Image: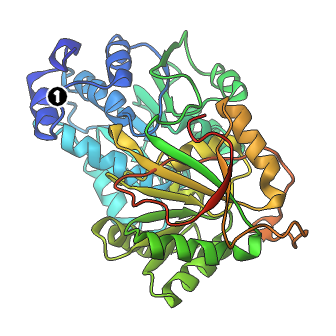
Amino acid sequence: MSFKSLGLSDALLKAVDKKGYNTPSPIQEKAIPQILERKDVLASAQTGTGKTAGFTLPILQILSQAPVLRKRPVRTLVLTPTRELAAQVYENIKEYSEFIDIRSAVIFGGVNAKPQIATLRNGVDILVATPGRLLDLHGQGALSLNSVEILVLDEADRMLDMGFLRDIKRILNLMPAKRQNLLFSATFSKEIKKLAGGFLHHPVLVEATPENTTAEKVDQQVYRVDKSRKPELVIKLIGEGEWQQVLIFTRTKHGANRLSEKLNKNDITAAAIHGNKSQGARTKALDGFKKGSVRVLVATDIAARGLDIPLLPHVINFELPNVPEDYVHRIGRTGRAGASGEALSLVSQDEMEYVRGIEKLLGLKLPSAVLEGFEPSGKPEKDEEDDRGPRQRNPRSKAKQGTGNKKPNRFKSRSSGNRNS
């Protein structure tokens, strides 16, 4: 199978070739023909498998074949849950549309809206947006959604959860009822599928891999440790392992700040990224991490989706997420596009119910070990509050992937579980 056999134009094939891609991924191979046939699509695939191109390429094909309208109203709307993902999708659209006459733009909060409004007034064919800023600019009369022909919900499960549901419903009411709807994500719960059924029209279900699965080349490992000793263990793992690029997930914004500060005090360059940071600070931290000037990026789940960091070798769950599906997205930052990666989870006694929730979702038992010198005391520890108040005792949690170019583990461990299970 080649991109040409999917029916893409020469201009799009030229752009794909320029990016160095020769063969479509399974999700692209299955989704592109369905989208070109103007069907509604519910697409599920692992992170890092080319979902963005899976909807971007056929949309560009559809739009480029239609007459160019003088005022260029928004004809395709792509909604994403985070600013970082919106920016990444926009960059992909720009790259793939290099050789065709298509205008695209991205709008999100945290930055000055005036340049975004000026861009919209010049006419935009494809708009990538986060819900809040989109509704804000629509309320100001800066844009209209009356001409939208194609709606894309990227990371659709998060877009349709209770945090975004009200905004999504408002946005749906601003668009023509007759349109093509495309939902892409790595995970879809039964509840989300039922909810999506309310506005999808005879959707085609496209699955490149079984739902809620993780990349095969991600080495997942659980280390049981007291909560109070997690910072010490992280510093030891990174320092003695000489890891140069590590993405660490915390449950709270304050926790991300504290861990980042502690790492810097121990001569490990780190930066925190979360919702309380300005967009400028978030962009600077991510850019430094990608370029290597920042060794460790400590993030809340704002980074669990959409961050495409090529060949990221290490992901650490400093704390497990409350929702098991989020584990899949977190560890999906490593082991992308066929690369290998390592995903470690530091688990205190009070998080074991989250481990069980993740194992149930994945249908496998995560290998577990205790590192010498970091044996759990077995004593109950004070439960921290998250950024929304006391942490809920919800057995739904997350997990992570990966290693790449990792050095042999220098720690002796007492394992319980098969690493290959």
Instruction: Let me know if residue 142 appears in the view.
Output: no
Number of other residues with Cα within 10 Å of mark 1, as a class: few under 14, some 14 to 19, many 20 or more = some
Query: Which residue is rendered at x = 34% and y = 55% of the image?
Result: 405
Relative depth, front residue between 35 and 132: 35
Locate residue 64, reporting x and y percent. 19, 26
In this view, 340 is above or below 271: above
Locate residue 235, reporting x and y percent. 54, 77
Instruction: Point out the residue furthest to the bottom here.
Output: 265
Residue 7 lies in quadrant: top left
Q: Secondary structure at mark 1?
A: loop
Looking at numbered disc 1 in the image, what kind of residue is underneath it? Asn
In this view, 34 is above or below 258: above
The residue that mark 1 highlights is 22
Relative depth, front residue between 18 and 406: 406
Instruction: Let me know if residue 29 appears in the view.
Output: yes
Relative depth, front residue between 202 and 345: 345
Query: Which residue is rendered at x = 38% and y = 43% of the image?
Result: 336
Relative depth, front residue between 240 and 59: 240
In this view, 300 is above or below 221: below
Residue 370 lies in quadrant: bottom right
Query: Which residue is rendered at x = 64% and y = 44% of the image?
Result: 367
User: What quarter of the picture does the C terminus occupy?
Assistant: top right
- Is 156 positioned to the left or the right of 74 in the image? right
